[in-house]
Structure formats: structure tokens, C-alpha cells
Image (tube, helix red, strand yellow):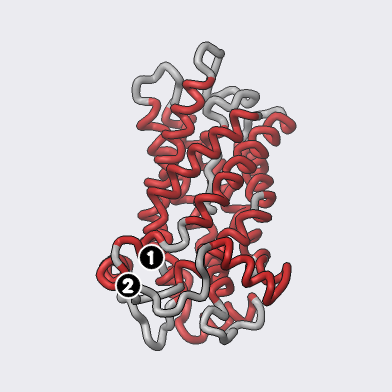
């Protein structure tokens, strides 16, 4: 169990560094004003942020996921591994259930973390040096929100986070289990790491596609009120307004950036976790198909980012 947590921490940090710029683009596209859009698409958004805010603009809000994903990954890897042990059988259904359980539990950290991340990513849009910073950093952001809105404020978007993360992690674990079995990933296979990278990346993509519309609504709710005015009174009000103004296409905003991010983030996470576990468990018996071992079992566990 301790190695589950440690592997999750190491893998999560690697994933954040690789994927955060894509996440910043995703959030900007999801919440931009459709009447006065700043960005025409994914690549235009990348170019605009770099030109107007420098490369550092792509890493706005990275402090929150760097801190939070350490704990999130530890929870996800630990809960999934222990749930599989309790279920006792390594079946696709159990993989889904274990993943869904891990996804639901980590929302306690994931929701406030993503709230701070989203607010920081939206701060100073289009400015190289923000003239007036509302938040100094992610922690200051959460403190200010708590002082103004209380406990409910720092958990804004919790319901949508739960709706996204619970099935999202379940789909991820199920897809990863199916892919690793199909590819025949074995510890002695010289192509094991490339196979795991591919399986992890594709599973991350499947997970995001399955819950992406919910993520759009979550981002809009968490970014609501940044300018001092709240546009949405509830989840359904956000869905209704978004559909009325932008149609069904609204639920695909930022999807390209998300999928471009999903593959390298998951691939990086799993490669890191794989190597970490191989070194730590050197000399121990390990097999990717054993439900009781975490050797490659937790590699079927991906932090989404939150994180995904």
C-alpha cells in the first residue's frame, strides 16, 4: 500500500509538468465569452497566451495541481489497489468499480484544487504583467474564497466534479485493463514500457471523452464570479444558458487541447510509475495480471486530472 501512495506521488508530478499548458488552454476555451471570444481555437489560444503573457502564462495556476495531485494520486493509487484486494477478482467490472471508488473519494481534494487552478488560470488573461492581481497564489485564492463564501465557496463545483470523476476513473481503469491484456504486457517483455505508455495514453483519452461535457460545465461554474458577477445560479442554469447561447457544440469546447494533453500526461505518469515500482520491487515476484500485486495494477490507475 505504501508503494501505491509513493508511486502515485512521483507519477503525478511528472504528469502535471507535461500537461499543464494544455490544461490552461482547455480552461480558457471552455469559459471564454462566446459574444466576444478571445481565441479562435486550440492553436490560436496557445499562440495568444505565449505572445500576450509569455510562456509563463501557460503555467498559471500550476502550484495548485503540483500540491494537490500529489495527494490525489496517492489516494487514487491506494484506494484502487486496496479495493481490488477487497473485491478479490481481477475482472473488468471490478476494475471499473475500483476506479470509480477511487475517483469519488479523491474529489474531496480535487474540487478545491481545480477551483484554485481555474481561478489562477483566468487571472490576468491577455496581460503580460497583471495590473491588479486578485490572488497572489493558489493558497491565497482558496483563503480569499473561504473568507468570502465559506466552506461552500471552496467546494464550488463539487457535484459536477463527482459526476465527472466517478465514471471517468472507472472508464479509465476498465480501458487500461482491456488494453494491457490485449497487448500482452509482461514484465519480461522488452516492449513493456512502450506498450504501457500507449495503453495509458489511450485510456486517458477514453476517460476524458466519456465525461467531457460535464467538465465544461464544471469549469464554467468554478470560473463564474471571477469578474465580480455571477452568471449561473445552479448546474442546470449553467447547462441551459450554455445550450441557448452556443448549442450542443459548447460541450466540445477545449476538447482538442484536452485530448492532446491526455495522451502525454498519462503516458508520462505510467512510465514514471512503472520505473519507480520496478526499482522499488526489484527482486520481488511481480506480474501485471496479479490482482493482489500493485506492480502494474496501479498502472491501471491514472490520476486525472484530475486530474486526467
Q: Nearer the viewer, residue 230 or 208?
A: 230
The image shows a total of numbered marks equal to 2
Q: Residue at x 67, y 39 (%)?
A: 79
> Label 2 crowding class (10 Å Cα cut-off): few <14, some 14-19, many 20+?
some
Picture coordinates of residue 98, whole percent (x, y): 66, 40
SS label for mark 2: loop
Locate the N terminus by quadrant. top right
SS label for mark 1: helix
Q: Residue at x 51, y 26 (%)?
A: 277
Q: Nearer the viewer, residue 51 or 272?
A: 51
- The residue singled out by tag 1 in the image is 25
- Give the vertical position of 28 relative to 266 (above or below): below
- The residue singled out by tag 2 in the image is 128
Q: Nearer the viewer, residue 109 or 139?
A: 139
Picture coordinates of residue 290, whole percent (x, y): 59, 23
Q: Viewed as shown, does residue 38 lie left or right of 289?
A: left
Picture coordinates of residue 42, whole percent (x, y): 32, 67
Picture coordinates of residue 241, whole percent (x, y): 55, 84
Q: Viewed as shown, does residue 92 lie left or right of 132?
A: right
Amino acid at each position: 500500500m505504501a508503494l501505491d501512495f509513493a508511486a502515485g506521488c512521483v507519477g503525478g508530478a511528472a504528469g502535471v509538468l507535461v500537461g499543464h499548458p494544455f490544461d490552461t488552454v482547455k480552461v480558457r476555451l471552455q469559459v471564454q465569452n462566446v459574444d466576444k471570444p478571445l481565441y479562435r481555437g486550440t492553436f490560436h489560444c496557445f499562440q495568444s497566451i505565449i505572445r500576450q503573457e509569455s510562456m509563463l502564462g501557460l503555467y498559471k495556476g500550476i502550484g495548485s495541481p503540483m500540491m494537490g495531485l500529489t495527494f490525489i494520486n496517492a489516494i487514487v493509487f491506494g484506494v484502487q489497489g486496496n479495493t481490488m484486494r477487497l473485491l478479490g477478482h481481477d475482472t473488468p467490472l471490478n476494475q471499473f468499480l475500483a476506479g470509480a471508488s477511487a475517483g469519488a473519494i479523491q474529489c474531496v481534494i480535487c474540487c478545491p484544487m481545480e477551483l484554485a487552478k481555474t481561478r489562477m488560470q483566468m487571472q490576468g488573461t491577455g496581460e503580460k504583467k497583471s495590473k491588479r492581481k486578485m490572488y497572489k497564489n493558489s493558497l491565497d485564492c482558496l483563503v480569499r474564497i473561504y473568507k468570502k463564501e465559506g466552506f461552500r465557496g471552496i467546494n464550488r463545483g463539487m457535484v459536477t466534479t463527482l459526476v465527472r470523476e466517478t465514471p471517468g476513473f472507472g472508464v479509465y481503469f476498465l480501458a487500461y485493463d482491456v488494453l494491457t491484456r490485449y497487448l500482452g504486457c509482461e514484465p519480461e517483455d522488452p516492449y513493456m514500457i512502450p506498450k504501457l505508455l500507449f495503453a495509458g495514453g489511450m485510456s486517458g483519452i477514453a476517460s476524458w471523452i466519456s465525461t467531457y461535457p460535464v467538465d465544461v460545465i464544471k469549469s464554467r461554474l468554478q470560473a463564474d464570479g471571477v469578474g465580480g458577477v455571477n452568471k449561473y445560479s445552479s448546474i442546470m442554469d449553467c447547462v441551459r444558458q450554455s445550450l441557448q447561447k452556443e448549442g450542443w457544440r459548447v460541450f466540445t469546447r477545449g476538447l482538442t487541447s484536452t485530448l492532446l494533453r491526455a495522451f502525454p500526461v498519462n503516458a508520462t505518469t505510467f512510465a514514471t510509475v512503472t520505473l519507480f515500482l520496478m526499482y522499488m520491487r526489484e527482486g520481488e515476484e511481480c506480474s501485471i495480471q496479479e490482482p493482489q500485486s500493485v506492480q502494474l495494477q496501479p498502472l491501471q490507475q491514472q490520476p486525472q486530472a484530475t486530474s486526467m
